[in-house]
Image (spheres, rainbow, N blue to C red):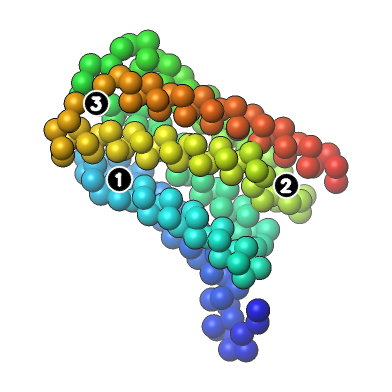
Amino acid sequence: MQIKDPIKNWWFVNLANLITASRLIFSVWLVLLAIFTDQLFLMFVIVCLCGITDWADGWSARRYNIASQFGAFLDRLTDKIFICPTMAVLAWQYWPVSEINLSLKLLTEGLVVVIILLETTLMASGIIGLVKNLDTSSNKWGKAKMFFQSAAVFGWFLCLVIERYLKIKITYLAIFLIDIILVIAVGLAIKSIEGYWQRYHRL
């Protein structure tokens, strides 16, 4: 689809990238709020907005055939900025008030560290692909991984919001469920890394 007006055409061609850029802004805002404030409900709303814009940029790129190499890299970069700092801050200072088993807490923190290391590896592979002008778009494992990671972040914030504003005690089972989601995300991240290396070696 081509629009004659150059300005309108630029906006159209870059629609997916602009949506991704808005998600990048939301992600940075979320991290800053998590570090410097205690506005849980606002943070929860931003997490929801990040999820909506993540779906919207992919949908618009496919629907209007406006996907680009830069857009694919920006999307992956934004995913990393959304997931890694947010999970790190959550594991560092945001836990339900209810008593959490120390072993479970250490398990959760360990899974967060593993995810951050895997995401760093994925980001490095994306940079290598971009420099070599290779396809850096997310593979099916990466998309599934991002879904589970986002679900874990969403669930974590949801637990905090329910506990603070609805005064409902969160049990260790909720954190255990989040850990299960994180374990699945770790497995998918490993498959995603394997998929990128196979893609690059075929070229």
Query: Which is closer to the viewer, label 1 or label 2?
Result: 1
Within-10-Å neighbours for mark 2: few <14, some 14–19, many 20+: some
For the N terminus, the image quarter is: bottom right
Disc 2/disc 3 C-alpha distance (Å): 43 Å
> On the image, numbered disc 3 is attached to which residue?
170
Residue 125, picture quadrant: top right
Who is closer to the viewer here, 160 or 85?
Answer: 160
Residue drawn at (49%, 54%) of the image: 54
Q: Are marks 1 and 2 in contact (CB under 8 Å)?
A: no
Quick one: SS at disc 2?
helix
> On the image, numbered disc 2 is attached to which residue?
129
Disc 3/disc 1 C-alpha distance (Å): 17 Å
Quick one: SS at disc 3?
loop
Mark closest to the chain's N terminus, 1 or 2? 1
Q: What is the x, y in percent for residue 9? A: 59, 81
Label 1 is placed on what type of residue? Phe
Label 2 is placed on what type of residue? Gly
Q: What is the x, y in percent for residue 152? A: 42, 34
Residue drawn at (28%, 30%) of the image: 94
For residue 61, side relative to residue 91 (left or right): right
Quick one: SS at disc 1?
helix
Label 3 is placed on what type of residue? Ile
Residue 167: which disc?
Answer: none
Query: Which is closer to the viewer, label 2 or label 3?
Result: 3
Disc 1/disc 2 C-alpha distance (Å): 33 Å
> On the image, numbered disc 1 is attached to which residue?
44
Q: What is the x, y in percent for residue 175? A: 35, 24
Q: Are marks 2 and 3 in contact (CB under 8 Å)?
A: no
Residue drawn at (56%, 65%) of the image: 60
Task: Work out which residue is located at the far right of the displayed protein and give it.
Answer: 202
Residue 41, picture quadrant: top left
Q: What is the x, y in percent for residue 11? A: 53, 76
